[in-house]
Amino acid sequence: MRAMDKSSALEYINQMFPTEASLSGVEPLMQKIHSEIRHVDAGILAAVRQQSNSGTKAKEDLAAATSAVEELMYKIREIKTKAEQSETMVQEICRDIKKLDFAKKHITTTITALHRLTMLVSAVEQLQVMASKRQYKEAAAQLEAVNQLCSHFEAYRDVPKITELREKFKNIKQILKSHVFSDFSSLGTGKETEETNLLQQLSDACLVVDALEPSVREELVKIFCNRELTSYRQIFEGAELAKLDKSERRYAWIKRRLRTNEEIWKIFPSSWQVAYLLCIQFCKLTRAQLEEILDTLKEKPDVGTLLMALQRTLEFEEELAEKFGGGTRNKETEIEEIDKAESNSQTVLDIRRKYEKKLAAHHGSGTDETDGPKDFSVPGAGFNFRGIISSCFEPHLTVYVELEERTLMESLEKLVQEESWDIEEGQTNILSSSMQVFLVIRKSLKRCSAMTKSQTLFNLFKVFQRILKAYATKLYGRLPKGGTGIVAAATGTDGQIKTSDRDERMICYIVNTAEYCHKTSGELAENVSKIIDSQYADKVDMSEVQDEFSAVITKALMTLVHGLETKFDAEMAAMTRVPWGTLESVGDQSEYVNGINSILTSSIPVLGSLLSPVYFQFFLDKLAASLGPRFYLNIYKCKHISETGAQQMLLDTQAVKTILLDIPALGKQNSGAAGYSKFVSREMSKAEALLKVILSPIDSVADTYRALLPEGTPLEFQRILELKGVKKADQQSILDDFNKHGSGITQPSVAQSVVPAVPPAPAAPVVANPASVGAIVVSREDVLTRAAALGRGAATTGFRRFLALTEAAKDRKDGPFRKLFSP
């Protein structure tokens, strides 16, 4: 640190005096420095003095503050002492005042209690007089006053006088109750017309009942309702009216009763809801009587009578629900979910018209009794009248479901019989019977849902399932069938399905109809699940019905395929009759190819215009899967095939392949053309490979067969030798050689087409003789080369065309004979 200070001092001196000439300024600089030192010393001395003085002052200030605090504490103690003395003085002054205040309070309470007791005694005596004179209006007000006065003496229950008054008051209330009940017993007996003031007296009596306990009002209303329904019980329990077809008169009776007594029953306060409670009791009694009637029936009830009784019951319940505001279900809204175009009133008319003839003998004459009563709406009533009576019909509606099923089945049979199985131009490609079937089902659903949404509706839904399954069976049965019987077996047409152009259109209509039914049945199930009771909603399912229609679609499409197969029979037979062994030259495509083209050109455009893309694609796949293998097997059915014949047949195969590939464009539906084209190419490539084998020289035919048809059997190879015209004597040696080398040739062919992740171990014979493996491989390469050069040097125009077609196969990326065209 010192070295650094010295260094800094030297640098400062050198900076101040860089030359000798500058040393002349040393003396002035020294004087200046001494002056600054003296100034700093003076400042330090002044600061020390000032600090010393301020320390002394701080001690003095601290001592003064301590003294002030002690003085303050003394004053506080003095004030506290004086406050305690003042409190003691105040308590002594107020002691007597408190005693006087408590005395005044007790005297006031006593005076008030005595005054109220006097009022209570007087009020009870007055109430007793009013009760004896049946002065109900005054007694009602007096009851309120006595009740309020009694509430003030709850704490004095043990006082004998109070107990005596309360017992007396209780007896008076009992007397009032008996008087009121006695007076109300005359209501409805005709006395109200004789005694003009009776209704007013009863109206005042209601005020007394309101002033009494709530149980009194409930008891009075219950007695009144039971008395009102006594005559109803007697009338409709008799043998004459205790019948199902008299149900409408029951509801007319209560409506007439409400209408007739409207003015009289105004004596009851609206808060009592007398009409409302009377209707509830009426509904419960009616339900019990109807249940007894239904349970005691010896035979099944007449459907018309049962439904008419149920309909009248539903209408009555709806009227009560509208009057008294009970329930939350909106029947019209739910029915609109089935068909918004029709209203609930129309449903009622449908039922009425449907069973009008059956009910003609059972109709009563009291039409005037069905007039609706006037409005007795009770705000705030929450009882649900819907279903309170009608639910008792539920266990007995099986006859209705059976009738609906018979009606629907008859409608189905009629619609199927009247079906033309054809569609006029400009209309939808759906059979009209299907839309009519769902229309009658929808009407049936509306009829049932207007009456019940419980077990009966679920049973009817099961009927819908059976009807739709029956319709699916009708569609299935309409499809063309194959020939059966002795004649068909004798003519070789057993199992063949022959279809005309009209049949093909009809099959397409059946496919579209089944698709429409599949979709609409699902929508029907959704609508039913929305309106049916929640306990059945999860059981509503149309999957089985939809499976039936799916089966119809599949069968119809397969029938289309089989129908076209039958049309191809003549062309396949014509193919086998061509003298392939004696053809002199290769020309244009054969006549049977033109026949196949003509059949497809006639049918495919119509099918493409009628079928949806999905089903048309399914049809094409099945057609290609049928025609490709059939064409391949048909080659084996031919007789001798010469080299020229094989070349002509290969040309025909390419033509058939081109025709099949053009089918999507012919049907104007190209959505799945790529996959279909690959499928057709794969199927037709087998026939091309077979013809390549037939074209190969006799000395290499076995190797060519193994190379191009690695999955072929010895029997098929023997048949190829017969097609080539090899004599029986020469066939055996070729077959022996084929069987001898079959495993050695097939294995490399499979290995080249599919390369495994781990090379398979070679077969034992190949390992035992590796030289033979090389020979076989060389032989196979030679066979492939020669097969690619078949027909080289031919001069005819037809064969040049054949070569041009085979050149097109070079663009293929797969196939068993792709290597034939490899360089």
Image (cartoon, helix red, strand yellow):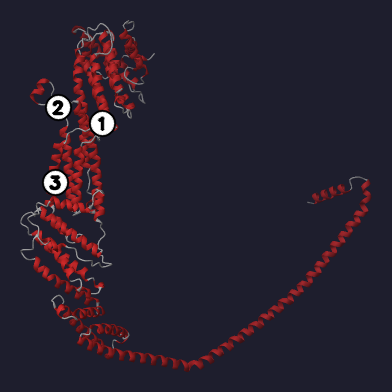
Judged from the image, the secondary structure of the residue bearing numbered disc 3 is helix
Q: Position of residue 76 (x, y in %)?
A: 61, 84
- Check disc 3 and give the amino acid type: Glu
Q: Position of residue 422 (x, y in %)?
A: 19, 32
Q: In terms of sequence position, does the residue under pointer 3 or pointer 2 come before the other?
A: 3
Judged from the image, the secondary structure of the residue bearing numbered disc 2 is loop
Q: Position of residue 232 (x, y in %)?
A: 12, 68
* Marks 3/2: CA–CA distance: 33 Å
- Contact flag, marks 2 and 1 (Cβ < 8 Å): no
Asked where in the image residue 644 lies, by quadrant, the reply is top left
**Of the two numbered discs 1 and 3 in the rendering, the one whose residue sits closer to the viewer:** 1
Q: Is residue 768 above or below residue 727?
A: below
Q: Is residue 575 above or below residue 42?
A: above
Q: Which residue is mark 1?
A: 610
In the drawing, what numbered circle is on residue 482?
2
Residue at figure coordinates x 94%, y 46% from the top left? 21
Q: Is residue 382 above or below residue 479?
A: below
Closest to the observer, 785 or 781: 785
Q: In terms of sequence position, does the residue under pointer 1 or pointer 3 come before the other?
A: 3
**Of the two numbered discs 2 and 1 in the rendering, the one whose residue sits closer to the viewer:** 1
Asked where in the image residue 569 lies, by quadrant, the reply is top left
In the drawing, what numbered circle is on residue 405?
3
